[in-house]
Image (cartoon, rainbow, N blue to C red):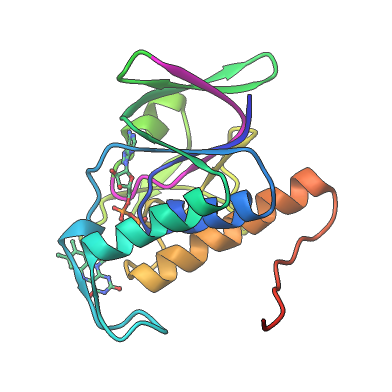
């Protein structure tokens, strides 16, 4: 059983995984390689002069893997409630059990709708439907959180990455029972 399963390895999901894995939480990231970020070229990502979408995605995956998060290339086909948490079904036939799920699937809301998450019309350009979350990133289903484009934040990588980090910190804080902060000292 994983503590956290993250669906999506775009900026929102990978950034969330970096925080949860670095905090020592058993994390798995599932991605179907259908994100929008791979089509982009970035010159507005703070701290990076310019980078291609594919490079940004590759670095993000390496960053969370460095801290022990597992990466599965597969499509999640359903999220189900179980007696002791949540189960994510993959198109490979595999199932993944986790206490918490962070849905960071970009423009893809099919899983959310299948699970019965509350959705609403999006307000950002070209984003039709979003998942309704509270200020923490919690959905209406216990243990299921959402981050990034799917929650209706401004469709910019630095913002979706920040939102993924925010939601991850909230999940970690809930698991720890106290507010969590991840600050490293200058080496
Ligand atoms: C052409 C283009 C140019 C852009 N240019 C810029 C720019 O210059 N600057 C900027 O800041 N932003 C730009 N953006 C927007 C930027 O890419 C997004 O705002 C941001 O990266 C979205 O991050 P995300 O993690 O929310 O979604 P995504 O990056 O779309 O990631 C979602 C991930 O979820 C995965 N997924 C979805 N459903 C499933 C499933 N069922 N199972 C498993 N995995 C699943 C997908 O494979 C994907 O990897 C551009 C976008 C496009 C399309």
User: Residue 155: x, y in percent?
Assistant: 32, 66
Q: Nearer the viewer, residue 166 or 121?
A: 166
What stretch of residues is rendered in magenta? 94-107
Magenta highlight on residue 122: no
Image quarter where the C terminus lies is bottom right
Ligand 1: quadrant of the figure? bottom left
Which residue is farthest right? Answer: 177
Image quarter where the N terminus lies is top right
Left or right of residue 2, residue 57 in this image:
left
User: Residue 166: x, y in percent?
Assistant: 59, 62
Residue 93, above or below 171: above
Q: Nearer the viewer, residue 47 or 84?
A: 47
Residue, x 31% and y 18% (percent of image)? 92
Left or right of residue 7, residue 38 in this image:
left
Residue 46, above or below 57: below
Magenta highlight on residue 101: yes
User: Residue 24: x, y in percent?
Assistant: 69, 47
User: Residue 183: x, y in percent?
Assistant: 71, 73
Q: Is residue 14 visible?
A: yes
């Amino acid at each position: 059983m994983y503590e956290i399963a993250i669906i999506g390895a775009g900026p929102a999901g990978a950034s969330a995984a970096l925080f949860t894995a670095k905090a020592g939480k058993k994390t798995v990231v599932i991605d179907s390689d259908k994100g929008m970020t791979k089509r982009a070229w970035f010159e507005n990502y703070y701290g990076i002069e310019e980078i291609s979408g594919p490079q940004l995605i590759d670095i993000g995956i390496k960053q969370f893997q460095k801290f022990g998060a597992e990466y599965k290339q597969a499509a999640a086909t359903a999220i189900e409630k179980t007696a002791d948490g949540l189960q994510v079904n993959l198109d490979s036939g595999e199932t993944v059990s986790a206490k918490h799920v962070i849905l960071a699937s970009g423009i893809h809301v099919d899983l959310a709708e299948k699970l019965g998450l509350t959705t609403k019309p999006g307000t950002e350009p070209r984003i039709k439907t979003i998942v309704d979350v509270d200020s923490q990133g919690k959905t209406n289903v216990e243990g299921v959180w959402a981050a990034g484009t799917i929650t209706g934040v401004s469709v910019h990588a630095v913002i979706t990455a920040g939102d993924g980090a925010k939601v991850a910190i909230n999940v970690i804080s809930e698991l720890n029972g106290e507010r969590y902060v991840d600050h490293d000292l200058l080496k």
